[in-house]
Amino acid sequence: MAGLTLTVVSPEREVLREDDIEMVVAPGIDGELGLMPRHAPLVTQLQAGTLRYRSGGDERFLTILGGFLQVMQDTVTVLADGSERSDEIDVERAERARAEALRELEEARVGGDDATVIRARLALLRALARIRTAQRAGRG
């Protein structure tokens, strides 16, 4: 049986284009989505998290920083707000970003700055997505 074609693009670049994918698990807005060949057509929103896929029996990982996913005729297309392959993640930088976001979040909560709270929460989610992706890939 033929596999899926998976394409992940961000505003900066094409992150991934690969054929014969056996399975994709994506961070949907309402939970993880499992996709296999012959999946019904679908368009859904993604949240920050780890997209994993299996090809040739190997599992691989990408960070997705939100966006949209479309499934159509065994083609999975991800239009990501941002994305990195697990081997591209700078774990130390992600840890620093996590610490900074936590500090900023606490300061904004104390100061009652709702807009900064929202920005800090988003920064924290992005940092955590990167850290978790690296951990899942055995890098953290």
Image: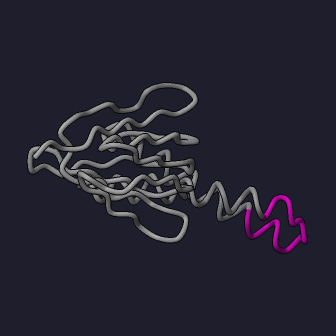
Prevailing secondary structure class for the magenta stretch in the rendered image: helix
What residue is drawn where x is 24% and y is 48%? 60
What residue range appears in magenta?
105-117
Residue situated furthest top in the rendering: 13
Q: Using the image, determine if residue 75 lies above or below residue 38.
A: above
Image quadrant containing the C terminus: bottom left
In the visual, does 104 lie left or right of 127? right
The x, y position of residue 13, in whole percent, is: 48, 25
The answer to if 113 sits in the magenta stretch is yes
- Observer able to see residue 140: no
Query: Image point 53% across, 42% down: which residue?
Result: 80
Question: Residue 99: where, in percent of width, then height?
Answer: 59, 59
Q: Is residue 73 above or below residue 109?
A: above
Residue 5 picture quarter: top left
| Residue that appears at 85% across and 59% down | 115
Numbered circles on residues, count:
0
Left or right of 126 in this view: 21? left
In the rendered view, tell whether residue 3 sits above or below residue 122: above
Question: Is residue 120 in the magenta section?
Answer: no
Counting from the top left corner in percent of width and height, residue 28 is at 48, 62
